[in-house]
Image (cartoon, grey):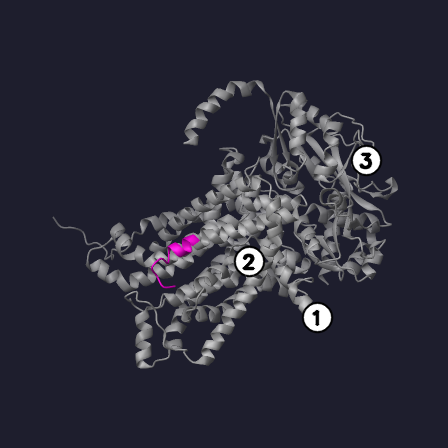
Amino acid sequence: MAHRAQPLRLPGPPRVPGAVAAALVAGLVLGPLAAVALRAGGGFAPGPADWAALRFTVTQAAVSAGLSVLLAVPVARALARRRFPGRAALVTLLGAPFLLPVIVAVLGLLAVFGRGGILNSALGLAGVDPVSIYGFRGVVLAHVFFNLPLATRLILQGWLAIPAERFRLAASLNAPVGRLLEAPMLRAVVPGTLLLIFLLCLTSFAVALTLGGGPRATTVELAIYQALRFDFAPGRAAALALVQVALCLAGTLLALKIALPSAFGGGLDRRVQRWDARGPLWRAVDAGVIGAAALFLLAPLAMVVARGAPGLADLPPSIWAAALRSLAVALVSAALTVALALALALRGGRLATVAGTLPLAVSALVLGTGLFLIVRPVVSPLDVALPVTVLVNALMSVPFATAALVPAVASAEAAHGRLATSLGLTGWPRLRLVLLPRLRRPLGFAAGLAAALSMGDLGVIALFAGERQETLPLAMYRLMGAYRMEAAAGAGLLLLALTLALFWIFDRGGRVGADA
Amino acid sequence: MRRFLALPLALLAAPALAQTPELVVYTYDSFDTEWGPGPIVEAAFEAECGCDLRFVAAGDGAALLSRLQLEGPSTEADVILGLDTALTAAAADTGLFAPHGLSPEMDLLPVAWDDPLFVPFDWGYFAFVADAGTEAPATFRELADSDLSIVIEDPRSSTPGLGLLLWVEAAYGDEAGAIWEGLADNIVTVTPGWTEAYNLFLEGEADAVLSYTTSPSYHVIAEEDDGKVAWTFDEGHYMQIEVAGIVAGTDQPDLARDFLAFMTTDAAQSAIPTTNWMFPVATPSDGLPEGFAEPLPADAALLLPPQEAQAVRDPALETWRTALSR
């Protein structure tokens, strides 16, 4: 019996779950948007104020993303090629600003750079006029503060993924590491990182508004907020949210075009040793870069700790219940994020990248409102406050997890795929035996990031939570709303500690036995 | 495991619940926290109504109204508690509220009240709050001419921000634009909400913050700190009156009306000052607590009628945006 010719299709890692995950993510992002649009009310004709908001939003996002990545490259390079005591702890701590709730981080930042902050006090002592943080530069400064850690980590992952053998070879040939190894790696990693941060800054709301100094710093997200909250014009909110999605798609396609996958081939997972940049000058440069980044990122954190410590004693008992609730939400949503992102990364290709980036593009308020509209006819939103929060938090972390996993899967496949195929390893055995061991580090990072982000995110809980279902960030905001700033600062410190601990445990778990 | 336990328990409890009517009240976040008025009001009302009072917290006042609009006539809410006078016209336009038919005694409220849909339960004056040692301007013009720095809330995302917008509008009308232009160099920044603004002020980022005349009372009573004052302006102070209304589609109209009436009785009113940090509408039987702010003279009260407040909002926003974007 003759079989029909089958198209040649190389068996690889499982791809079907990826398609399902992509559909799920896209549905969860676009479904709520459609629900808001269908709720109608208030047409949309963009006025001059909208165009000004769009211009400001795109400009600040582009500048913030560019600057974050520009500064992250030397920091990541220094961290990649130096070993020193406390390096692992420093790498974890440097990630903290990205994980903090906005208001906590902004207050920490102001304690350093604000009118009454350390910097201006020092300048005052030196007889120099104070510098104002408010305005465009404040927005960019805050966004760099938030995103430099993410950029550093993603680029550092790229550096650590270059096999040790390549450095060994380069050293024995006396070949330039920068041009032959680092530049191609950056070409592969930087466009995606830039895109991620650009999109994060695109939907920024509280940072841009608090530090922006006035209506000049109006973002599209504020216009959405106003449309939903004060004007009750869901149509307008949906249209503005669509503009954000369009910008996201355009950015993603552009990043895909620019990025070139690196082709380092496989290695034997040896410990990386570096023979380049050994001179005292380079050592001094790297020490300076790491020191400056640590000072910039850690000084505001130290202020969060200093402000929060006295408040720990005034924490109301309910805060502990909120903290436990937050931990549970964080763990479940981290598991969900990793499952979704892993499926997407295994599927690979354009679909995975687009679906993996989409959640960043959509306004949290539109997403929450849309889910509210979808859920409500079926079940009381109060009853599903926590499940919905888990789902949305998981969704919001997918882009970061995908960004960490896609390049790792691609390089593992490039290095070991052909051998695995020739051995007939496909589907789950291939995932278990070939890929997962190689993905341990990015998986740990992704899970830690997802758990920590979910822990600190206000997400949609504020829209759904009813009687005493609050999470830790919501409890903190409510303390502030009741004038209890000291207790709120204590709650902020608790949140910082728990978030960092979660991140550290997962991230560490992914690095057990690995030298990084 | 809890799921499996919960189901039979719920079945057991169901007949008992069926006999107790339930009143669902949507309110803003800070009303129903353990230190807010919520628990006191709930205990006192449940003691006399033979019902189960359930608060559902939904963000701030504006979020409350948009939540109700999202849900429409099928809403679960019987009462909405916590809209303010800048929102009542929009709320009335939704057609989702029913007349209350009450005429409670409100001796502390400095303005006459005859709104058929909404009953006030507390109120306050917007004011700039500063450290006691800071020189205090007496008018918006003096503030604009000074080097004092202020932090304000955005009228597009926060109710106090909208209150300030209406304050300048009510006090200056056509000159509002000039006032805003004068204030532009005093404004350190414009925050999305009261929380951010008040925090920034406490962190020393500005000399004063837009808040309420009753804000210093919190520091006096809860923290024994009399170092904060509210500036009194000669133009008068714009008022925020917080109201409750009965949802037209309620299945508990009598209970809802009882609750609105209850909110103006002493049991609820005496809890307001030190839990919500606003003025009650009726003088509590023991008077205002010691150390609590005194209401300003009645002629200092500025308030645009709800319809007018709604009508001037968009043009006033445009004026504000233009003046501050220069």
Confirm whether circles 2 and 1 share one chain.
yes
Which residue is disc 2 drawn over?
A: A202
Q: Most extreme residue toward the left, as rendered?
A: A1
Which of A465/B245 is in front? Answer: A465
Q: Subunit of mark 2? A: A
Residue B194 on the magenta segment: no
For label 3, count other residues whose C-alpha is less than 10 Å away and answer few (under 14), some (14-19) or many (20+).
Answer: many
Which residue is disc 1 drawn over?
A: A125
Which of B112/A461 is in front? Answer: A461
Residue lying at 34% horizontally and 80% vertically, measured from the top left: A175
Instruction: Please state if A450 lies on the left or on the right of A408 as rendered.
Output: right
Which residue is disc 3 drawn over?
A: B109
Residue A515 on the magenta segment: yes
Q: Element at badge 1?
A: helix
Residue lying at 31% horizontally and 75% vertically, measured from the top left: A168
Magenta region, residue range? A505-516
For label 2, count other residues whose C-alpha is less than 10 Å away and answer few (under 14), some (14-19) or many (20+).
Answer: many
Q: Element at badge 2?
A: helix
- Residue A96 percent location from the top left of the image: 51, 57
Q: Amino acid at mark 2?
A: Leu
Q: How many tags in the picture?
A: 3
- Residue B215 percent location from the top left of the image: 75, 45
Instruction: Please state if A372 lies on the left or on the right of A12 as rendered.
Output: right
Instruction: Please state if A183 lies on the left or on the right of A44 as rendered.
Output: left
Q: Amino acid at mark 3?
A: Leu
What's the CA distance linking mark 3 and mark 2?
A: 45 Å
Instruction: Please state if B213 lies on the left or on the right of A426 as rendered.
Output: right
